Image (cartoon, rainbow, N blue to C red):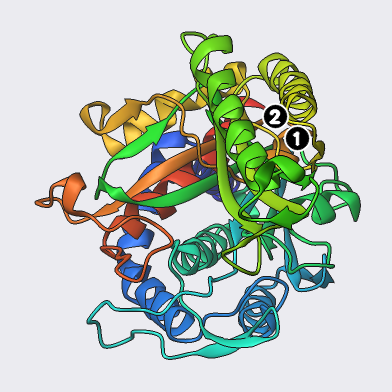
Amino acid sequence: MKKTFLFLQVLLLLFISSKSIFAQSNNSSDWYEYIHQTTEEKYKQIVEWRRHLHENPELSNREFETAEMVAEHLRSLGIEVETEVAHTGVVGILKGGKPGPVVGLRADMDALPVKERVDIPFASEAMSEYQGEQVPVMHACGHDTHVAMLMGVAEILADRKEHLPGTVKFIYQPAEEGAPPGEEGGGKLMVEEGVLTNPDVDVIFGQHISAQTPVGHINYRPGGIMAASNRFSIEVKGVQTHGSTPWSGVDPIVTSAKIIDGLQTIISRRTELTKEAAVITVGIIRSGVRNNIIPEEAYLEGTIRTLDTEMQEKLFAQMHETVDLIAKSMGAEAELTIYEGYPVTYNDPQLTEKMATTIERVAGSEYAHVIDPITGAEDFSFFQREVPGFYFFTGGMPADMDPADAAPHHTPDFYIEEVGMKTGVKALANLTIDYMMMNQE
């Protein structure tokens, strides 16, 4: 009888112990401590990955070695891997041991045709072909840190996948900076190829390192955080004549000057800027071959930035009207073409409200900031157009530096303080766990 009683006691203790372990593995605070400690332990490896990527940058749709490195890493973690998505993209699927939602995590991989000037041991000396020319290549926007951070998140979550209440889809995206002329690419092509399906992604999170934001800080915003971006071109046709007798022709250069002034007046006098910011910039104007010849044609090209879709439609209509009427008033003809670009990077307000608690916990409430919108653009917006998404900025500037002294993105002096990656890794991993905990099946 005693033996039977002792046996039952042992079974009861084992049952209680197993229940305790199960409860602990599904406890939020247990996950938070695990993510914090593991990020600190893996930080050195994350830095090594980032430095390797920084020394070996690749341009848009040419991220072959980067993709191979990512795919090999994911496979080593037992993650299901698909390659050559949207040319060079990599997608990894980590199925947790428990049912739950599907969370997408995205990092962009491409570099820029920029010559690095930063004096660091792992500075890029890479060269590549861009629009038919050999150019220097540099990770001048921090995409190398994005890849390294997401590789770290993949390892942290894969090491504990049996306790993961859901599925994670790791999306390593090519060509965020734009596909080469004549090619498709980026987030738009990934969406078209079904990256958000099979399994269907419920939400998606993404981040961008910021060279003007101090290390440890996180910036975010509900609604539009980054602008829609559209390229436009204008072909102006006049009548060629001798430069000494302008009245005998129609000057496309003067007409172009009037058009540029008219476009700026749309912003300064016809756009409700208290509602949202908007920008029209002419960045290219080409015309003429000789100083004493009024040419027949002029060509203009520029960019439009908007943060509101209704304002965007109104702006497009006003641009067509302005270009056409100014050209006619000068006796010329002009054709405006507005090309499809990136949509507004739009943080789903309800999702942002839920995940703000996570951001404040990771960074600390005094280091988590709701910011004004930014007129830069991001093709993370294509993912957000399909599923609710949350995009934020992680600090990468030395804590003691004045933001006014920090080199902007896309410049030769662009610099990232690597310790900022710790915050980015912790943020993505915690956002994933918190969302899964909120939506367990």
Q: Nearer the viewer, residue 109 or 34?
A: 109
Left or right: 399, with 93 as reference point: left
Q: CA distance from mark 1 to mark 2?
A: 7 Å
Q: Nearer the viewer, residue 334 or 169?
A: 334
- Location of the C terminus by quadrant is top right
Q: Residue at 58%, 46% (x, y): give it.
A: 11
Q: Which element type, helix, strand or loop, lies under badge 2?
A: loop
Could you tell me residue 88's position as x and y percent? 76, 73
Question: Where is 114 relative to 174, above or below?
Answer: below
Question: Where is 245 relative to 19, above or below?
Answer: below
Q: Quadrant of residue 249?
A: top right
Of the image marks 1 and 2, the number of the one nearer the N terminus: 1
Pointer 1 with pointer 2, Cβ within 8 A? yes
Neighbourhood count class around disc 1 (C-alpha, 10 Å): few under 14, some 14–19, many 20 upward = some
Mark sitting on residue 202: 1
Q: Which residue is mark 2?
A: 388
Could you tell me residue 53's position as x and y percent? 48, 80
Note whether residue 233 is visible: yes
Could you tell me residue 87's position as x and y percent? 82, 72
Note whether residue 165 is visible: no
Mark sitting on residue 271: none
Left or right: 61, with 374 as reference point: right
Could you tell me residue 106's position as x and y percent? 63, 53
Q: Which element type, helix, strand or loop, lies under badge 1?
A: loop
